[in-house]
Image (tube, helix red, strand yellow):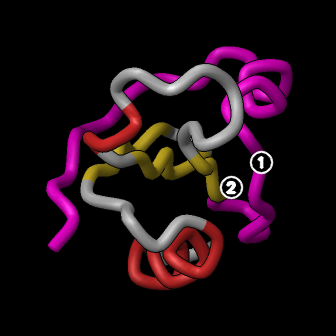
Amino acid sequence: MVSYEKALEIARNLKPNVDGCTEMTDAYIFGSTEDEFTIGGDGPVVIMKKNGEAYNMTAYLHRSKGAREIREIEVK
């Protein structure tokens, strides 16, 4: 099981401007308020709790059958 701290480290290696996180039952979804009006490309990065694998949002949605939101986290 990957901790929030480890997931944040992985996410920041892929997306340095992370400033928010949504914790799901199976993953952490990291994003940036700067991404509000992007067209493709620089969207959220999803880190799976089970193994630390990183996915884009589309790939995660295909894997997240029944996942529920736990909480919103402000990344500092």
Residue 66: % across, % down? 65, 16
Is 46 above or below relative to 51? Answer: above
Q: Nearer the viewer, residue 45 or 49?
A: 45
User: Which residue is at a point 73% across and 61% down the rendered structure image?
Assistant: 50
User: Which residue is at a point 77% across and 48% down the rendered structure image?
Assistant: 55
- In the displayed structure image, the side of residue 4 where residue 55 appears, left or right: right
Which is more foreground, mark 1 or mark 2? 1
Where's the C terminus, which quadrant? bottom left
Q: Amino acid at mark 2?
A: Met
- Asked if disc 1 and disc 2 are in contact, CB closer than 8 Å, the reply is yes
User: Which residue is at a point 60% across and 81% down the rendered structure image?
Assistant: 13
Q: Amino acid at mark 1?
A: Tyr
Q: Nearer the viewer, residue 34 or 59?
A: 34
Kindly state the secondary structure of the residue where label 1 is placed. strand
Q: Quadrant of residue 70?
A: top left
Residue 45: % across, % down? 60, 50
User: Which residue is under mark 1?
Assistant: 55
**Mark 1–mark 2 distance (CA, rounded to whole Å):** 8 Å
Mark closest to the chain's N terminus, 1 or 2: 2
User: Which residue is under mark 2?
Assistant: 48
Q: Quadrant of residue 33?
A: top left
Find the magenta span and give its range.
48-76
Residue 24: % across, % down? 46, 38
Kindly state the secondary structure of the residue where label 2 is placed. strand
User: Which residue is at a point 34% across and 26% down the rendered structure image?
Assistant: 36
Is 52 above or below relative to 5? Answer: above
- In the displayed structure image, the side of residue 46 where residue 35 appears, left or right: left
Is 23 above or below relative to 69? Answer: below
Q: Nearer the viewer, residue 10 or 51?
A: 10
Where's the N terminus, which quadrant? bottom right
